[in-house]
């Protein structure tokens, strides 16, 4: 038991996040996905409070990661003499890849909300163009702030708060909240409803695609700790964190 605890202490925050997400994926995140779907339905019925919730969640999706990266940047590069591993050493850490992934996530969430809110009606040109242009602009700024985290600061931050330990802990909290939000959307897509499998072969056929999708959706919030892990096993732990959701998707939720 002591060895396991010592291993966890030495594993870093990424491993703790994986275990946290795994535990929440068992029960809480499916419930949160159902709650979010209920909020969307209420917003489509004209509930102003639900509409404000949707707006707040959309803002959080775009703000949490850059805010967490800004708060943790100085501390992340002080933790080790050699700083973070080079994020450009892999195509997955290329900002263009991350930006395209954020475009896809934003478009998927926007399309789902538009479908639930407007149904067969088309949104007005002002709403559509505003959400499109605003989403592209915010995604670009979001990506720049996230990847700025990987470049070592040339000098300490002027703000004493950003140099203090509280900013690092707060940054971790925002990064974890961002991971929770991404996982809620992932569970939401699972709960849209997929038929139960009829055979073992059908179940196995779903696994590779779902594992790939799970890693892609977990990659944006996990990227900060992934750059510190420097181990191939980190990807296996990321799959482990998503295992409950993947299994629900493979088996089918029967809706």
Image (cartoon, grey):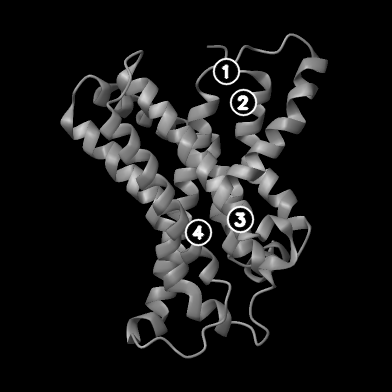
Inter-mark Cα distance, 2 to 1: 6 Å
How crowded pointer 4 is (Cα within 10 Å; few <14, some 14-19, many 20+) is rated as many
The residue beneath circle 3 is 96
**Label disc, if present, on residue 143 of the rendered structure:** 4
The residue beneath circle 2 is 248
Closer to the observer: label 4 or label 2? 4
Residue 123, position in %: x, y? 30, 24
Inter-mark Cα distance, 2 to 3: 31 Å
Residue 7 vertical placement versus 191 (above, below): below
Q: Is residue 213 visible?
A: yes
- Label 4 SS: helix
Q: Residues at badges 4 and 3 in contact (C-beta under 8 Å)?
A: no
Residue 156, position in %: x, y? 45, 89
Q: Residues at badges 2 and 1 in contact (C-beta under 8 Å)?
A: yes
Quarter holding residue 6: bottom right
- Label 3 SS: helix
Earlier in the chain: of badge 4 and badge 3, it is 3
Q: Nearer the viewer, residue 38 or 121?
A: 121
The residue sitting at 26% across, 34% down in the picture is 126
Quarter holding residue 68: bottom left
The residue lying furthest to the top in this view is 198
Earlier in the chain: of badge 2 and badge 1, it is 2
Earlier in the chain: of badge 1 and badge 4, it is 4
The residue beneath circle 1 is 253
């Amino acid at each position: 038991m002591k060895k396991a605890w010592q291993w966890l202490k030495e594993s870093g925050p990424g491993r703790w996040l994986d275990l946290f997400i795994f535990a929440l994926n068992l029960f809480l995140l499916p419930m949160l996905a159902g709650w979010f779907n209920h909020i969307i339905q209420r917003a489509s019925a004209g509930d102003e409070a639900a509409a404000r919730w949707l707006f707040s969640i959309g803002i959080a999706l775009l703000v949490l990661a850059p805010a967490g990266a800004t708060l943790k940047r100085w501390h992340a590069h002080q933790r080790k003499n050699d700083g973070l591993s080079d994020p450009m050493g892999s195509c997955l850490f290329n900002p263009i890849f991350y930006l395209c992934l954020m475009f896809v996530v934003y478009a998927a969430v926007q399309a789902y909300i538009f479908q639930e809110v407007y149904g067969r009606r088309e949104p007005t040109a002002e709403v559509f163009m505003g959400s499109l242009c605003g989403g592209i602009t915010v995604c670009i700024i979001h990506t720049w702030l996230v990847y700025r985290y990987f470049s070592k600061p040339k000098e300490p931050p002027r703000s004493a708060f950003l140099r203090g330990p509280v900013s690092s802990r707060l940054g971790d909290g925002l990064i974890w909240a961002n991971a929770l939000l991404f996982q809620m959307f992932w569970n939401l897509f699972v709960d849209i409803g997929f038929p139960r499998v009829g055979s073992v072969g059908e179940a196995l056929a779903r696994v590779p695609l779902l594992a790939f999708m799970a890693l892609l959706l977990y990659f944006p919030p996990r990227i900060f700790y992934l750059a510190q892990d420097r181990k191939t096993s980190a990807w296996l732990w990321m799959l482990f964190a998503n295992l409950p959701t993947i299994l629900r998707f493979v088996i089918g939720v029967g809706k």
